[in-house]
């Protein structure tokens, strides 16, 4: 990009950038979107580390039957589907497929973006909980982006109309008619354009579909945001109102502030009727709260979540890693046998 244009982006208000052609209508629409959802935009997408995840199962594989290179390939390139699936995997996948289909038992008005139930995936690390939840999240994100795209096209049309109004005002003598106050006034065209763009932000907030309709938050990341007083209120309100929230690796770790956040999120989601909450954790439902709140939160969870117990599932990566270590140990013994005792 030309250096002068780059400087203009940083020094001019959006209305002037748009009027002078520094940004396109599409870029202006995205900039307004970023301003409205500043701070939470990064949580409106499934993390890149889970892009390979698919909502399905593969065949049963015994790592003992694989060669060293095959086991290494599994570690370096994680499978897109769940291998050696257990009952919990099958139940979680079927539940998520029901939601994606808009099944009336789990969705409002057949809409996969308005689930009426969540899921609580718990058990040992490496059992596939996050894999399955992220795979489901990809499908939800794709559907949401399709609907947002349609809304954004209309939104860009609104910005285009504002820009045409600005151009007409310039052609007509550098004055614009502003009727927003109920009386006819002549005002500077750029001022009117800036006011219209501010109105555009309110339009975004009131859109039927918004990026924050789906949030994917690692619990540690959420704790950091919650710890900052200037973002706490907005974050909690956004989480409370989002139709779908994914919370990965929820655990208090004995920290009272983390426990308070768990209590707050579940209570607020319950009170708002937003039951499309999906949690991964190593804690059973009856241990999600502290001693004073465990029973209370468990009763909330009984209404909000389908519990999915991954306790008996294998840690596939750990299993494959173990065989890699065994291969190394075998090679060590072979070398010792070949070279004899070290003097």
Image: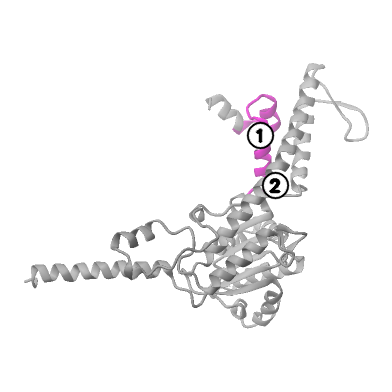
Q: Residue furthest left?
A: 343
Residue 169 placement: quadrant: top right
Residue 26, numbered circle: 1
Q: How is the image coloured?
A: one colour
Quarter of the image that includes the C terminus:
bottom left
Q: Quadrant of residue 166?
A: top right
Q: What percent of the width, then of the height, locates residue 310? A: 53, 74
Seen from this angle, which residue lies furthest right? 183
- Residue 36 on the magenta segment: yes
Q: Is residue 232 above or below residue 32?
A: below
Looking at the picture, tell me which residue is in the foreground, 100 or 130. 100
Determine the CA span between mark 1 and mark 2. Answer: 17 Å
Q: Which residue is mark 2?
A: 147
Q: Residue furthest front?
A: 59
Q: Residue at x 70, y 47 (%)?
A: 147
Instruction: Please name whichever residue, 139 or 263, is drawn nearer the observer in this view of the structure.
Output: 139
User: Judging from the image, what secondary structure is the residue with disc 2 in?
Assistant: helix
Label 1 or label 2, whichever lies nearer to me, is 2
Q: Position of residue 162 (x, y in %)?
A: 77, 30
What SS does tag 1 mark?
A: helix
235 lies left or right of 272: left
> Which one is nearer the viewer's eye here, 229 or 124?
124
Q: Main secondary structure of the magenta part?
A: helix
| Residue 338 placement: quadrant | bottom left
- CA neighbours of label 1 inside 10 A, class few (<14), some (14 to 19), many (20+): some
Q: Residues within 10 Å of mark 2 (few under 14, many from 20)?
A: some
Q: Which residues are magenta?
A: 10-39
Q: Is residue 323 something one can see in this rendering?
A: yes
Q: Position of residue 138 (x, y in %)?
A: 58, 54
Which badge, 1 or 2, is on the more N-terminal residue?
1
Disc 1 and disc 2 in contact, CB within 8 angstroms: no
């Amino acid at each position: 990009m030309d250096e002068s244009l780059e400087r203009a982006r940083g020094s001019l208000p959006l209305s002037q950038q748009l009027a002078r052609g520094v940004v396109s209508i599409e870029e202006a629409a995205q900039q307004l979107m970023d301003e409205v959802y500043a701070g939470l935009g990064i949580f409106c997408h499934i993390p890149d580390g889970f892009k390979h995840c698919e909502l399905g199962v593969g065949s049963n594989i015994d790592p003992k039957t694989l060669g060293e290179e095959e086991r290494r390939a599994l570690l370096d390139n994680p499978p897109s589907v769940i291998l050696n699936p257990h009952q919990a995997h099958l139940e979680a996948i079927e539940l998520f497929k029901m939601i994606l289909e808009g099944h009336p038992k789990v969705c409002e008005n057949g809409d996969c973006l308005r689930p009426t139930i969540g899921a609580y995936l718990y058990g040992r690390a490496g059992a596939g909980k996050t894999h399955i939840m992220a795979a489901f999240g990809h499908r939800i994100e794709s559907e949401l982006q399709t609907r947002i795209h349609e809304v954004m096209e209309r939104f860009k049309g609104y910005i285009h109309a504002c820009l045409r109004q600005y151009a007409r005002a310039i052609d007509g003598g550098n004055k614009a008619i502003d009727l927003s106050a109920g009386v006819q006034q002549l005002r500077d065209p750029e001022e009117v354009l800036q006011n219209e763009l501010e109105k555009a932000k309110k339009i975004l907030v009131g859109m039927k579909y918004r990026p924050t309709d789906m949030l994917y938050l690692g619990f540690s990341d959420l704790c950091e945001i919650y710890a900052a007083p200037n973002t706490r209120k907005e974050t909690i309100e956004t989480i409370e109102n989002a139709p779908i929230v994914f919370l990965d690796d929820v655990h208090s770790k004995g920290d009272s502030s983390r426990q308070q956040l768990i209590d707050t999120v579940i209570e607020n989601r319950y009170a708002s009727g937003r039951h499309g909450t999906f949690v991964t954790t190593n804690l059973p439902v009856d241990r999600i709260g502290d001693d004073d709140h465990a029973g209370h939160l468990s009763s909330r969870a009984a209404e909000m979540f389908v519990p999915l117990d991954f306790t008996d599932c294998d840690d596939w990566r750990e299993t494959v890693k173990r065989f890699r270590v065994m291969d190394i140990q075998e090679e060590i013994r072979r070398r010792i046998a070949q070279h004899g005792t070290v003097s």
